[in-house]
Image (cartoon, rainbow, N blue to C red):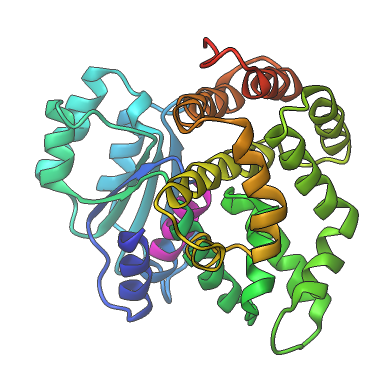
Amino acid sequence: MKQFYDLIEELKKGGQTATVYTIIGAEGLLISEAVNKIVETALTGAVRDFNYNLFYAKENSIDEALDAAKTLPLMANKRVVILKDVDQYPAPAHERLAGYLNNPSPSTSLILTANKIDQRTKFYKAVEKGSRVILFGTLYENQVRQWTRYRAKSYGLEFAEDAINLFFEISGSELGIIDNELKKLAAYIEGKKKIDVSDVEGVVGRSRVYSVFNLIDAIGERKAEQALLLLKKMLNDDEHPLGILFMIARQFRLMAKAMEFHKRGLSAGEMSKRLGLPVNILTNNLMRQIKNFTLDEVLKKYRLFYYADSELKGSIKSPEIILDDLILKLCSRAGEASV
Protein backbone atom coordinates (compact mmCIF):
# COMPACT_ATOMS: atom_id res chain seq x y z
CA MET A 1 0.00 0.00 0.00
CA LYS A 2 2.92 2.30 0.75
CA GLN A 3 4.10 1.85 -2.84
CA PHE A 4 0.76 3.21 -4.05
CA TYR A 5 0.95 6.35 -1.91
CA ASP A 6 4.62 6.89 -2.78
CA LEU A 7 3.89 6.60 -6.51
CA ILE A 8 0.94 9.01 -6.40
CA GLU A 9 2.87 11.60 -4.37
CA GLU A 10 5.90 11.27 -6.66
CA LEU A 11 3.78 11.77 -9.79
CA LYS A 12 1.99 14.77 -8.26
CA LYS A 13 5.36 16.50 -8.05
CA GLY A 14 5.81 16.13 -11.81
CA GLY A 15 9.04 15.16 -13.48
CA GLN A 16 9.85 12.26 -15.77
CA THR A 17 7.93 9.01 -15.68
CA ALA A 18 9.79 5.69 -15.84
CA THR A 19 10.31 3.96 -19.18
CA VAL A 20 8.57 0.82 -17.90
CA TYR A 21 6.22 0.20 -14.98
CA THR A 22 5.02 -3.25 -13.96
CA ILE A 23 2.01 -3.13 -11.67
CA ILE A 24 1.12 -6.47 -10.06
CA GLY A 25 -1.94 -7.24 -7.96
CA ALA A 26 -5.68 -7.82 -7.86
CA GLU A 27 -6.83 -4.48 -6.39
CA GLY A 28 -8.40 -3.16 -9.59
CA LEU A 29 -9.27 0.29 -8.29
CA LEU A 30 -5.74 0.98 -7.03
CA ILE A 31 -4.23 -0.27 -10.28
CA SER A 32 -6.55 1.90 -12.39
CA GLU A 33 -5.78 4.94 -10.28
CA ALA A 34 -2.03 4.37 -10.51
CA VAL A 35 -2.18 3.82 -14.28
CA ASN A 36 -4.31 6.92 -14.82
CA LYS A 37 -1.90 9.06 -12.80
CA ILE A 38 1.10 7.79 -14.78
CA VAL A 39 -0.71 8.52 -18.06
CA GLU A 40 -1.75 11.98 -16.90
CA THR A 41 1.80 12.84 -15.84
CA ALA A 42 3.52 11.41 -18.92
CA LEU A 43 1.16 13.10 -21.40
CA THR A 44 0.96 16.51 -19.75
CA GLY A 45 0.65 19.05 -22.57
CA ALA A 46 0.59 16.34 -25.25
CA VAL A 47 -2.10 15.34 -27.73
CA ARG A 48 -3.32 12.12 -26.12
CA ASP A 49 -4.94 10.60 -29.21
CA PHE A 50 -1.59 10.56 -31.04
CA ASN A 51 0.49 9.23 -28.16
CA TYR A 52 -1.60 6.69 -26.29
CA ASN A 53 -2.16 2.97 -26.93
CA LEU A 54 -4.03 0.39 -24.87
CA PHE A 55 -3.57 -3.36 -25.43
CA TYR A 56 -4.89 -6.51 -23.74
CA ALA A 57 -3.00 -9.80 -23.67
CA LYS A 58 -6.17 -11.72 -24.57
CA GLU A 59 -6.84 -9.57 -27.63
CA ASN A 60 -3.50 -8.29 -28.89
CA SER A 61 -0.21 -9.95 -29.78
CA ILE A 62 2.95 -8.99 -27.94
CA ASP A 63 4.36 -7.66 -31.23
CA GLU A 64 1.50 -5.16 -31.59
CA ALA A 65 2.25 -3.74 -28.16
CA LEU A 66 6.02 -3.67 -28.64
CA ASP A 67 5.73 -2.02 -32.07
CA ALA A 68 3.67 0.74 -30.47
CA ALA A 69 6.20 1.08 -27.64
CA LYS A 70 9.01 1.54 -30.18
CA THR A 71 7.11 4.25 -32.09
CA LEU A 72 8.30 7.80 -31.47
CA PRO A 73 5.82 10.22 -29.88
CA LEU A 74 4.15 12.84 -32.08
CA MET A 75 4.47 16.46 -30.98
CA ALA A 76 5.17 15.29 -27.43
CA ASN A 77 8.01 14.17 -25.19
CA LYS A 78 6.45 10.84 -24.30
CA ARG A 79 4.27 8.10 -25.70
CA VAL A 80 2.28 5.91 -23.30
CA VAL A 81 1.58 2.26 -24.05
CA ILE A 82 -0.50 0.16 -21.64
CA LEU A 83 -0.39 -3.62 -21.87
CA LYS A 84 -2.84 -5.30 -19.50
CA ASP A 85 -2.74 -8.84 -18.10
CA VAL A 86 0.76 -9.69 -19.31
CA ASP A 87 0.74 -12.77 -17.08
CA GLN A 88 -1.74 -14.33 -19.52
CA TYR A 89 0.79 -14.41 -22.38
CA PRO A 90 2.60 -17.71 -23.12
CA ALA A 91 6.33 -18.09 -22.47
CA PRO A 92 7.49 -17.09 -26.01
CA ALA A 93 5.71 -13.74 -25.67
CA HIS A 94 7.32 -13.23 -22.26
CA GLU A 95 10.71 -13.83 -23.87
CA ARG A 96 10.05 -11.14 -26.48
CA LEU A 97 8.87 -8.73 -23.81
CA ALA A 98 11.96 -9.49 -21.72
CA GLY A 99 14.07 -8.56 -24.76
CA TYR A 100 12.37 -5.16 -24.93
CA LEU A 101 12.93 -4.62 -21.20
CA ASN A 102 16.67 -4.98 -21.78
CA ASN A 103 16.59 -1.92 -24.04
CA PRO A 104 13.33 0.04 -23.64
CA SER A 105 12.52 3.09 -25.72
CA PRO A 106 13.47 6.21 -23.72
CA SER A 107 10.59 8.17 -25.27
CA THR A 108 7.90 5.70 -24.15
CA SER A 109 6.35 4.91 -20.80
CA LEU A 110 5.26 1.28 -21.08
CA ILE A 111 2.82 0.24 -18.34
CA LEU A 112 2.42 -3.49 -17.76
CA THR A 113 -0.26 -4.91 -15.47
CA ALA A 114 -0.59 -8.45 -14.13
CA ASN A 115 -2.62 -10.22 -11.51
CA LYS A 116 0.37 -12.33 -10.49
CA ILE A 117 3.82 -13.22 -11.82
CA ASP A 118 5.76 -16.14 -10.37
CA GLN A 119 8.87 -14.60 -8.82
CA ARG A 120 10.85 -17.77 -9.49
CA THR A 121 10.63 -17.36 -13.27
CA LYS A 122 13.12 -15.80 -15.68
CA PHE A 123 10.36 -13.47 -16.82
CA TYR A 124 9.90 -12.00 -13.35
CA LYS A 125 13.65 -11.50 -13.02
CA ALA A 126 13.61 -9.63 -16.35
CA VAL A 127 10.66 -7.54 -15.17
CA GLU A 128 12.38 -6.80 -11.87
CA LYS A 129 15.60 -5.75 -13.62
CA GLY A 130 14.06 -3.80 -16.51
CA SER A 131 11.10 -2.00 -14.97
CA ARG A 132 9.81 -0.28 -11.89
CA VAL A 133 7.78 -2.97 -10.12
CA ILE A 134 4.82 -1.91 -7.99
CA LEU A 135 3.13 -4.62 -5.93
CA PHE A 136 -0.47 -4.23 -4.78
CA GLY A 137 -1.03 -7.15 -2.43
CA THR A 138 -4.26 -8.01 -0.64
CA LEU A 139 -5.03 -5.20 1.79
CA TYR A 140 -5.32 -5.74 5.53
CA GLU A 141 -8.21 -4.21 7.45
CA ASN A 142 -6.11 -1.32 8.77
CA GLN A 143 -4.92 -0.57 5.23
CA VAL A 144 -8.49 -0.50 3.91
CA ARG A 145 -9.39 1.91 6.71
CA GLN A 146 -6.36 4.07 5.89
CA TRP A 147 -7.31 4.11 2.21
CA THR A 148 -10.91 5.02 3.11
CA ARG A 149 -9.71 8.13 4.96
CA TYR A 150 -7.34 8.95 2.10
CA ARG A 151 -10.10 8.61 -0.47
CA ALA A 152 -12.59 10.52 1.67
CA LYS A 153 -10.14 13.42 1.94
CA SER A 154 -9.89 13.59 -1.86
CA TYR A 155 -13.67 14.16 -1.91
CA GLY A 156 -13.42 16.83 0.79
CA LEU A 157 -14.84 14.49 3.44
CA GLU A 158 -13.80 13.99 7.04
CA PHE A 159 -15.28 11.34 9.34
CA ALA A 160 -16.06 11.50 13.02
CA GLU A 161 -14.53 8.37 14.59
CA ASP A 162 -17.83 6.64 15.37
CA ALA A 163 -19.07 7.47 11.86
CA ILE A 164 -16.12 5.86 10.09
CA ASN A 165 -16.44 2.80 12.32
CA LEU A 166 -20.06 2.39 11.21
CA PHE A 167 -19.22 3.17 7.58
CA PHE A 168 -16.41 0.62 7.58
CA GLU A 169 -18.57 -2.00 9.30
CA ILE A 170 -21.24 -1.72 6.63
CA SER A 171 -19.28 -1.06 3.45
CA GLY A 172 -16.82 -3.92 3.83
CA SER A 173 -13.36 -4.13 2.29
CA GLU A 174 -14.01 -3.87 -1.46
CA LEU A 175 -12.47 -0.55 -2.53
CA GLY A 176 -14.91 -0.10 -5.40
CA ILE A 177 -17.87 -0.37 -3.04
CA ILE A 178 -16.25 2.00 -0.54
CA ASP A 179 -15.54 4.51 -3.30
CA ASN A 180 -19.15 4.46 -4.50
CA GLU A 181 -20.45 4.99 -0.97
CA LEU A 182 -18.03 7.89 -0.45
CA LYS A 183 -19.30 9.53 -3.63
CA LYS A 184 -22.86 9.21 -2.31
CA LEU A 185 -21.80 10.77 0.99
CA ALA A 186 -20.09 13.66 -0.79
CA ALA A 187 -23.33 14.44 -2.60
CA TYR A 188 -25.43 13.89 0.53
CA ILE A 189 -23.72 16.16 3.06
CA GLU A 190 -23.57 19.21 0.75
CA GLY A 191 -20.62 21.07 2.23
CA LYS A 192 -20.91 19.81 5.81
CA LYS A 193 -17.48 19.76 7.45
CA LYS A 194 -17.58 16.42 9.24
CA ILE A 195 -19.57 13.23 8.60
CA ASP A 196 -21.44 11.84 11.61
CA VAL A 197 -23.33 8.61 12.23
CA SER A 198 -26.62 10.07 11.04
CA ASP A 199 -25.02 10.91 7.67
CA VAL A 200 -23.80 7.33 7.24
CA GLU A 201 -27.21 5.96 8.18
CA GLY A 202 -28.84 8.40 5.79
CA VAL A 203 -26.76 7.16 2.87
CA VAL A 204 -26.68 3.41 3.50
CA GLY A 205 -30.16 3.18 5.00
CA ARG A 206 -30.93 2.26 8.60
CA SER A 207 -32.61 -1.01 7.57
CA ARG A 208 -29.41 -2.05 5.82
CA VAL A 209 -27.43 -1.39 9.00
CA TYR A 210 -29.74 -3.59 11.01
CA SER A 211 -29.63 -6.37 8.37
CA VAL A 212 -25.85 -6.47 8.61
CA PHE A 213 -25.78 -6.68 12.39
CA ASN A 214 -28.65 -9.18 12.51
CA LEU A 215 -26.92 -11.50 10.04
CA ILE A 216 -23.67 -11.42 12.00
CA ASP A 217 -25.54 -11.94 15.26
CA ALA A 218 -27.48 -14.92 13.88
CA ILE A 219 -24.28 -16.62 12.71
CA GLY A 220 -22.61 -15.90 16.06
CA GLU A 221 -25.57 -17.59 17.76
CA ARG A 222 -25.37 -20.52 15.31
CA LYS A 223 -28.92 -19.83 14.12
CA ALA A 224 -28.44 -21.09 10.57
CA GLU A 225 -32.05 -20.86 9.43
CA GLN A 226 -32.38 -17.24 10.55
CA ALA A 227 -29.00 -16.35 9.03
CA LEU A 228 -29.97 -17.85 5.66
CA LEU A 229 -33.20 -15.84 5.57
CA LEU A 230 -31.30 -12.64 6.38
CA LEU A 231 -28.71 -13.43 3.70
CA LYS A 232 -31.42 -13.92 1.09
CA LYS A 233 -32.97 -10.56 2.03
CA MET A 234 -29.62 -8.77 1.80
CA LEU A 235 -28.84 -10.26 -1.62
CA ASN A 236 -32.33 -9.32 -2.83
CA ASP A 237 -31.58 -5.78 -1.62
CA ASP A 238 -28.48 -5.78 -3.88
CA GLU A 239 -25.92 -6.09 -1.10
CA HIS A 240 -22.55 -7.00 -2.60
CA PRO A 241 -21.64 -10.68 -1.89
CA LEU A 242 -17.98 -9.84 -1.21
CA GLY A 243 -19.06 -7.11 1.20
CA ILE A 244 -21.21 -9.62 3.09
CA LEU A 245 -18.32 -12.10 3.19
CA PHE A 246 -15.98 -9.44 4.57
CA MET A 247 -18.37 -8.53 7.38
CA ILE A 248 -18.82 -12.15 8.46
CA ALA A 249 -15.05 -12.78 8.32
CA ARG A 250 -14.41 -9.64 10.34
CA GLN A 251 -16.78 -10.84 13.05
CA PHE A 252 -14.94 -14.14 13.38
CA ARG A 253 -11.65 -12.28 13.58
CA LEU A 254 -13.09 -10.13 16.37
CA MET A 255 -14.35 -13.26 18.13
CA ALA A 256 -10.88 -14.80 18.07
CA LYS A 257 -9.31 -11.63 19.47
CA ALA A 258 -12.01 -11.29 22.15
CA MET A 259 -11.45 -14.90 23.24
CA GLU A 260 -7.73 -14.29 23.58
CA PHE A 261 -8.21 -11.03 25.51
CA HIS A 262 -10.80 -12.67 27.78
CA LYS A 263 -8.40 -15.52 28.50
CA ARG A 264 -5.76 -12.96 29.50
CA GLY A 265 -8.20 -11.36 31.94
CA LEU A 266 -8.60 -7.97 30.24
CA SER A 267 -11.46 -5.78 31.41
CA ALA A 268 -14.43 -4.98 29.17
CA GLY A 269 -13.17 -1.41 28.84
CA GLU A 270 -9.69 -2.48 27.76
CA MET A 271 -11.09 -5.07 25.35
CA SER A 272 -13.43 -2.46 23.87
CA LYS A 273 -10.50 -0.12 23.27
CA ARG A 274 -8.30 -2.76 21.64
CA LEU A 275 -11.08 -4.14 19.45
CA GLY A 276 -12.40 -0.72 18.43
CA LEU A 277 -15.94 -1.60 19.54
CA PRO A 278 -18.40 0.22 21.81
CA VAL A 279 -18.65 -1.48 25.22
CA ASN A 280 -22.36 -2.24 24.75
CA ILE A 281 -21.74 -4.14 21.47
CA LEU A 282 -18.85 -6.00 23.10
CA THR A 283 -20.84 -7.10 26.15
CA ASN A 284 -24.27 -7.58 24.57
CA ASN A 285 -23.18 -9.25 21.34
CA LEU A 286 -19.59 -10.38 20.97
CA MET A 287 -19.09 -11.79 24.47
CA ARG A 288 -22.35 -13.71 24.14
CA GLN A 289 -21.32 -15.14 20.78
CA ILE A 290 -17.91 -16.40 21.87
CA LYS A 291 -19.62 -18.72 24.35
CA ASN A 292 -20.89 -20.70 21.35
CA PHE A 293 -17.43 -21.45 19.93
CA THR A 294 -14.00 -22.57 21.06
CA LEU A 295 -10.96 -20.60 19.94
CA ASP A 296 -9.64 -23.60 18.01
CA GLU A 297 -12.99 -23.91 16.23
CA VAL A 298 -13.04 -20.22 15.26
CA LEU A 299 -9.51 -20.42 13.87
CA LYS A 300 -10.32 -23.54 11.85
CA LYS A 301 -13.56 -22.10 10.49
CA TYR A 302 -11.71 -18.94 9.48
CA ARG A 303 -10.08 -20.91 6.68
CA LEU A 304 -13.49 -21.21 5.05
CA PHE A 305 -13.46 -17.49 4.24
CA TYR A 306 -10.46 -17.82 1.91
CA TYR A 307 -12.22 -20.59 0.01
CA ALA A 308 -15.47 -18.60 -0.23
CA ASP A 309 -13.57 -15.51 -1.41
CA SER A 310 -11.89 -17.54 -4.16
CA GLU A 311 -15.22 -19.03 -5.23
CA LEU A 312 -17.01 -15.67 -5.31
CA LYS A 313 -14.27 -14.26 -7.54
CA GLY A 314 -13.84 -17.22 -9.87
CA SER A 315 -16.61 -19.81 -9.61
CA ILE A 316 -19.61 -20.24 -11.90
CA LYS A 317 -21.76 -20.99 -8.85
CA SER A 318 -24.18 -18.27 -7.76
CA PRO A 319 -23.11 -16.03 -4.82
CA GLU A 320 -26.18 -17.18 -2.87
CA ILE A 321 -25.19 -20.84 -3.11
CA ILE A 322 -21.60 -20.05 -2.09
CA LEU A 323 -22.65 -17.94 0.91
CA ASP A 324 -25.41 -20.36 1.92
CA ASP A 325 -22.84 -23.14 2.05
CA LEU A 326 -20.46 -20.96 4.07
CA ILE A 327 -23.13 -20.05 6.64
CA LEU A 328 -24.17 -23.68 7.11
CA LYS A 329 -20.55 -24.67 7.74
CA LEU A 330 -19.98 -21.78 10.14
CA CYS A 331 -23.08 -22.63 12.15
CA SER A 332 -22.28 -26.35 12.20
CA ARG A 333 -21.13 -27.85 15.50
CA ALA A 334 -19.19 -30.63 13.80
CA GLY A 335 -15.82 -28.88 14.09
CA GLU A 336 -14.05 -27.79 10.95
CA ALA A 337 -16.27 -28.10 7.88
CA SER A 338 -14.71 -29.83 4.91
CA VAL A 339 -14.00 -27.77 1.81
Does 103 sit left or right of 202 as displayed? left
- Main SS category, magenta section: helix
58 is within the stretch colored magenta:
no
**Nearest to the observer: residue 37 or residue 325:** 325
At which x and y percent is residue 93?
A: 26, 24
Asked if residue 76 is positioned above or below residue 223 in the image, the reply reads below
At which x and y percent is residue 225?
A: 83, 22
Give the residue displayed 54% in from the left and 71% down from the top: 149
**Nearest to the observer: residue 196 or residue 7:** 196
Q: Can the viewer see residue 334?
A: yes
Q: Residue furthest front?
A: 265
Asked if residue 12 is positioned above or below residue 93 in the image, the reply reads below
Q: Which residues are magenta?
A: 28-38
Rendering quarter of residue 91: top left
Give the residue displayed 25% in from the left and 71% down from the top: 16
For the N terminus, the quadrant is bottom left
Q: Can the viewer see residue 50?
A: no
Does 185 sit left or right of 210 as displayed? left
**Nearest to the observer: residue 291 or residue 22:** 291
Give the residue displayed 72% in from the left and 61% down from the top: 181
34 is within the stretch colored magenta:
yes
Asked if residue 294 is positioned above or below residue 332 in the image, the reply reads below
Rendering quarter of residue 114: top left
At which x and y percent is residue 294?
A: 51, 30
